Image (spheres, helix red, strand yellow):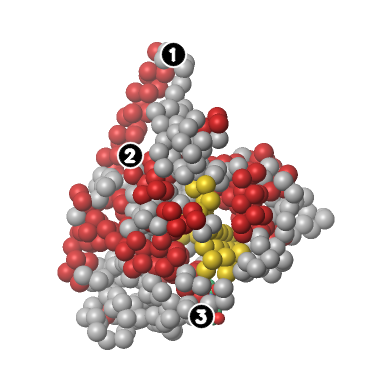
Amino acid sequence: MVKILSGTAKSSQAANPGTSSGSSKKRCTRRDLMLGFWVGIALAAIYLNTKRKPVIHAAASTTTKTKRTSPASSGDTVPIMSKSTTAEAETVPEPATTAETTTSTTETTTSSSPKIEPPAETSSSTTSTSSTTTGTSTGRRTIAGFTPKPGHKDFQKIGANAGTDKVWGADTFERCLQDQSTCPTPDFDNPKCRTLQGHFYHTLYNRWLGNYSLDDAEPFQFLEIGFFNGRGYDAYKEFLPRAETHSIEIACLPEGPREEGKWPWGNFAKENKHYQEYLDTNQLHCGDGADYDFLHETWTTHMKRPDAPPLKVVVDDAAHISDHMAKSVFFWFPKIEPGGILVVEDIQPIHEANKFRTDFLPQMMKDLHYCGDPKFPDKACFPTLWPLLHSIHCEMHICVFERNEMPAVEYDMERSIPPPHALNAEECLLKASGGATYG
Ligand SMILES: *[C@@H]1O[C@H](CO)[C@@H](O)[C@H](O)[C@H]1NC(C)=O
């Protein structure tokens, strides 16, 4: 939660410390009380039921412990290896592996041999003595995630040094799995969410930014939205030596009331030891990352210069408010050069970010598959975005939107901000394409 709270402060409308949202002014009637009672009983039953799972996890984790490096033993009881929705195929040319776990016992002591573990999701072994990860294979995940390819830098290592929570999950998860009581949020159903303020983003970054981390990569432009204390930014800079990097932060606005376009809640960006340097060299841009005018000015004056390298990578790690996240996609995605990517972080089930996950993403996903057959009652949800969208790849709480081969576009203001239905999927998803009546 540390991250979420601080994240909230990262952007304008976000931070309203002390304002509780969703409080109902209605008075409780007797009926409400009865309903509450039964809901309580039901929740208690569900809770008690889920409480039984940790026993399994605990048992499984003891076996993992004895082997230290084995992340993905007992297939479905320890779902550590969250699989990205669509990624794999073209990005990781992995060595041919034996997909079927034939004799799982022979795999247990391979820590120094080049034998490759079967992918966790195909492992059908029921005994928890199945596979071992050696950490020597290329492009193969360990509990820590993903071994970078030759020449690629390692985002996990760099992120851990920089102290960014983007990789904390990977750094703390093993201990938390072995001893659930050490987890920050031990009672979450999903083991990976028990490290709530720690993420596992290094796998996605290694995969998608690996090529950009090469020392001889083509120069490119990189933008982060949400500098905060700059730990993530420092990590990106080290990971991407060939990038011209930029970051946007609201907290370094002059101190004062929001109504005057200032920031009252303290300048956390200042904590960064390169703060002044970043300001002086036009890397750090102080303003509201959800405000069109500020974004437009930043883009046209500091980034879209004749001598600037092409904008290839944009990362939204700002306030994690659905509306702001949608704004980032609408403003930045069309400006990214062909083949570039937009990364959106922290798509977790939290109040602020929820609509992005439940309403925005599904509409993007629908559009990804859009054809526009005139004989089929169909509609694109975001007509300005789908013509530029090549793919969507997500891992837990983080997604990549990949640009296709179409040239970057400078839309006018109206088309650079989300339409009213961006965070309300109902119409476009359920009604606009024939719905249940079709087929
Ligand atoms: C990285 O570069 C290699 C070699 O050019 C290419 O095959 C691969 O698809 C690239 N990966 C990504 C994620 O762009």
Q: Name the residue carrying label 2.
A: 46
Crowd around label 1: few <14 · some 14–19 · many ≥20 (10 Å): few
Disc 1, SS = loop
Where's residue 400, x and y in %?
A: 54, 60
Q: Nearer the viewer, mark 1 or mark 3?
A: 3
Q: Name the residue carrying label 3.
A: 216
| Amino acid carrying mark 3 in the image | Asp
| Amino acid carrying mark 2 in the image | Ile
| Quadrant where ligand 1 appears | bottom right
Q: Name the residue carrying label 1.
A: 27
Where's residue 42, x and y in %?
A: 35, 32
Q: Earlier in the sequence, mark 3 or mark 2?
A: 2
Residue 411 is left or right of residue 282, and the answer is: right
Q: In terms of image quadrants, where is residue 23? A: top left
Q: Earlier in the sequence, mark 1 or mark 3?
A: 1
Q: Earlier in the sequence, mark 2 or mark 1?
A: 1
Front-most of 408 and 280? 280
Crowd around label 3: few <14 · some 14–19 · many ≥20 (10 Å): few
Residue 99 in sight here: no
Give the residue drawn at x 77%, y 57%: 372
Give the residue drawn at x 53%, y 77%: 217
- CA gap between label 3 and label 2 equals 54 Å
